[in-house]
Image: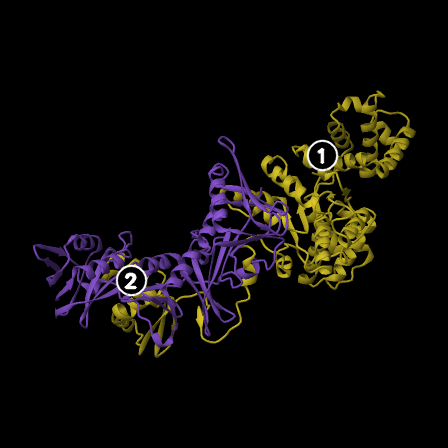
Amino acid sequence: MQHGLWQSVLGEIELSVSHAAFTTWFKNTELIEQSDSSVTIAVPNIFAKRQFEVKFNSQIKAILEKNGVSPDEINYTVRTTGKRTTTRETTAPPEQSKTRAEELIAPRPTPSASTNNSGLNPRYSFANFIVGSSNDLAFTACQAVASTPGTKYNPLFLYGGVGLGKTHLMQAVGNEIIKKQPEARVLYISSETFVKEFLESIRFKKKGFSDKYRNVDVLIVDDMQFIAGKEKTQEEFFHTFNALHQSNKQIIISSDKPPKSIPTLTERLRSRFEWGMSIDIQMPDFETRCAIVETKASLSGVELGRDTIEYLANNIKTNVRELEGALNQLLAYAEMRGVAPDISTAEGLIGNVRHTRPQHVTAKQIIDKTARHFQIDTKEICSAKRDKHIVVPRQIAMYLLRSELHLSFPKIASELGRKDHTTAIHSVEKIEKAIKLDFLVREQVAEIREKLYA
Amino acid sequence: MELSVTQENFTRALGNVGRVASSKAGLPILSNILLRTDGNRLLIAATNLEIASTHLIGAKIVTPGSITVPARLISDFVSSLPKGQVDLKVKDNHLHITSSSYSSIINGVASDEFPELPTIDESSTIQYSVNTADFKQAVSQTIITSSNDSTRPVLTGVYWHSFEGNLYLAATDGYRLSERRLVETKSDVAAIIPTPTLQEVLRTLSDDTTEVDVLFDETQVRFRVGDSEITSRLIDGNYPDYRQLIPDTSETNITMATSDFVRITKIAGLFARDSGGSVTLTADQEKKTLSIHSIASELGENTSSADAEVSHDGQVTLNSRYLSEALAAIEGDMVSFRFSGKLSPCVLTTKSDDVNYKHIIMPLKS
């Protein structure tokens, strides 16, 4: 209403003054208050205020009256951002100025700077991280880092697939450190932010880029793999890394692959990443998944039946985030429809979720994908050859056939052109053992599995 | 309007006021100067809608009135006239100017199209009277570090504010910072004055004025220098809390002759043009020297050193231009220069117990 009134005033005035005068004086004006006796108009500066008071007042008044508003007086006020520039009484300094100062020049450490700008989400803590056999090593290492940052495992390199809790763990470390030493400067960024800010610093010749990263006590970089292939950024990160490492500042890095397997990561960065401790976070096992579902459900104040929990844990195996999503979906659905979040509701819903992840993997697909992963021919894998570069993939294929499709051993043997099922038994056992001991095998199995369900 | 003025007064007033009139503004009348009788004086005024500059000169008024005329033309014309009396007369929006054997008619525009000049209610303002020399020094010391990056408007001005009973001026462009204590104050002030305004005030100062009056209002500031007044808008926004950036103590404290420091900085700067002005300063406690090293990859390199009192060995890399400007702004024969390592801010002050000017420079990454 007020807006419309002022628009019609402007419309009429535009016709009566020159274009230049109109854009000079009436741009950025606004009717901000209207009552029976007075109208207040906000103008951009003191010059405009004076001009309105003296030159345009009668004209505006006349137009307002034409529009059915006849105020006794029209007030003009200079628009400010709500701050009084000058006061005679002593007032407290504006609070926000503190946080704005350190973007000004390289900051000196201030408590407010570390907490407000660490980029951490306080929601992530060690307390709400669910530990299972797949991630207990990573969890312990992170706790060690949090208790004595910069000394024990530096850098700490966490890797694993999506939605397995890398970000949660890293942020938990940051939050824990801040909790213990509020003055510590913790900075959490994604490598993408790093790249972006680096590019900006080049493009706009901004300074202070490296100061921002080199003046911290703990630097946490998420999703390091995105830095791959960006040579200059890697170089800058390399220097940042060295500066921090040399002054015993803690560095925590996460990635979806171990440093070795990130292509186009420069050699010197790779060797540095492998310097400290690199730990993989595995997909959670069944028990851990059950625990996750149970904990998350009870956080939402819902008690789920054992069978429902197991159903969810059984059907979503590879990604904790997805698991939580399915649980949230179930809870929301149950609440909206007013039904119990039991197994039948879950079955109805998870059907939808599962669509994104086709489960109908065939034995042939497993063998093909395994062969392709090792860059050998499918024929060779099914042949009787006993060369080492064929034997291992064959054994892995057998293991996968067993673990993914639960085929019988004789069936596994025949799929790979073997007559004797004991070969299959031996192979599966061997790989099961190797997975526990050899990280390379574990890695390969995980990658093939990912390809299968991709 | 009909009146007589002296050429000396009139040309000085036009010179002061005319700089503000701008031909670039969207409103054509802003490139004009307003002439208006005010009692028995002549008011000469111009504005660019950020700054309004006015000047009053004595005149023999025959009939009161007003007109606006193009700033460039009238300034150039009047400054070319011989000294003595100049007669002004307005007839149908034409200004007739006659002086002994010169006469011209300038086509003007009626003064009611000229923007109203801002008024200030003096009773509601906070006022300071500052010695001209102090004013000049304080403003020149601070405007050099104000920013011209329009994306951060608050940094494009000088922050006048009260702090612990004193009025301070501060300015920063993000790479360096300067702070100057000006006068004592009992009121609370926090105002960001645009740098161009202050430059304009500096230009208006002449040797025969001893005091500058500064009047702060909620949204504007007015400087009064003799018969001249410059009124300006203030920059809206909160100035960052810069004080936390000034270190209280530093690892390496150096005291040396300002002239020595200026010389070695200038020499080192010659070899730092390639590297964007980057020079490395090394303080040696044993040898009692401060040396500056700079390399120009194609031209050669340089190391200059000078005697200095050094509390602790240290090294820091700075932009030589910033350093030169800082040294030029610091008064006194002896300068105190302190820093802590390669990353913390460096502080330059005069060597004195009562320091009223601090200049802070951020080191470059070497």
Query: In the image, what residue type sits under mark 2?
Result: Ser
**Outermost residue, left direction?**
B101
Q: Are marks 1 and 2 on the same chain?
A: no
The quadrant of the rendering that contains the C terminus of chain A is: top right
Q: Is residue B75 above or below residue A422?
A: below
Q: Is residue B309 visible?
A: yes
Q: Position of residue A40 (x, y in %)?
A: 36, 72
Q: Is residue A162 visible?
A: no
Residue beneath label 2, please?
Answer: B53
Residue A318, located in which quarter of the rendered image?
top right
**Outermost residue, right direction?**
A422
Element on which disc 1 rests: helix
Query: In the image, what residue type sits under mark 1?
Result: Ser
Q: Position of residue A429 (x, y in %)?
A: 89, 35
Of all chains, the one bearing label 2 is B
Residue displayed at 17% across by 59% down: B7
Q: Position of residue A108 (x, y in %)?
A: 60, 56
Of all chains, the one bearing label 1 is A
Q: Colour of chain B?
A: purple
Is residue A18 toward the left or the right of residue A93 in the image?
left
Nearest to viewer (mark 1 / mark 2): 2
CA separation, marks 1 and 2? 69 Å
Few, some or many residues within 10 Å of mark 2 (<14, 14–19, 20+):
many
Q: Which of the numbered marks, if any, corresponds to residue A261?
A: 1
Q: Colour of chain A?
A: yellow
